[in-house]
Image: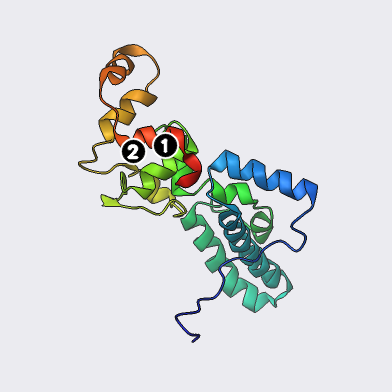
Amino acid sequence: MGDPKKPRATYTPPRNPWRSDQLSQELYLLGTYGLRNKRELWKTQTFLSNIRNQARQLLAASSDVRGREEPKLLAHLTRLGLIQGSANTVDDVLSLTVENVLERRLQTLVWRRGLARSPYQARQLVSHGHVSLNERRVDVPSYIVSPEEEGTLKFAEGSPMARTIMAQVTPGGEVAAKASEAPVGSELAESDQSPAEN
């Protein structure tokens, strides 16, 4: 075990960080999914790279090892929601992309479910403890949500932001009109001004 004061790096930076096509792709993913910095993207890429390496090792392994280890890997990825269905193979694992992993993040799901107006606001809601899974608050935006937990995703019990934000993300109608009259919390106002600080 290493020194706890010097933790190992949880990501591997790209070998050629200044390629123009790579820079544009990274900036696109940062903006689309509301990531804080490139380190978050590199952590996701490293996580996916480790999974793909396991799949490649299984393809090169003997039939006994593959028959024993392949179901474990596929079951693990199915629990994470990265692959669906029971008729999956190692080839399905090798076809996974970074976007598949980013779509399973708690921050992204909060935004996709309409609980926030932008991925940056979704990040702020999660970081400030306004979101719960399985009746417990989760304040980690990069948390990978399993399909079982996805059904329990909602605003935390007693969150002061729940009524305000739900009214504002509802398009049209009386609820949206009432939301414009309701006082907006300081957290919501900050999310529009400085999303990069979250």
Residue bearing the label numbered 1: 191
> Residue 91 appears in which quarter of the rendering?
bottom right
* Separation of residues labelled 2 and 1 (CA atoms): 6 Å
Label 1: how many Cα within 10 Å (few below 14, some 14–19, many 20+): some
Q: Is residue 185 above or below residue 81?
A: above
Rendered position, 136 above or below 68? above
Point out residue 17 in the picture as x, y percentages from the top left corner.
74, 57
Give the camera-side residue of 121 and 150: 121
Q: Which numbered marker is on residue 187?
A: 2
Q: Is residue 113 visible?
A: no
Is 23 or 63 nearer to us in this picture?
A: 23
| Above-or-below relation of 125 to 73 | above
Amino acid on which the number 1 mark rests in the picture? Ser
Q: Give the colour scheme shown.
A: rainbow
- The image quadrant that residue 42 belongs to is bottom right
The residue closer to the viewer here, 34 or 190, is 190
Label 1 element class: helix
**Residue positioned 44% across, 30% down in the render:** 117
Q: Are marks 2 and 1 in contact (CB under 8 Å)?
A: yes
Q: Is residue 95 left or right of residue 68?
A: right
Residue positioned 33% across, 17% down in the render:
176
Where is residue 23? Give x, y as percent. Answer: 72, 48
The type of residue carrying mark 2 is Glu
Q: Residue 86: image x %, image y %?
A: 54, 53
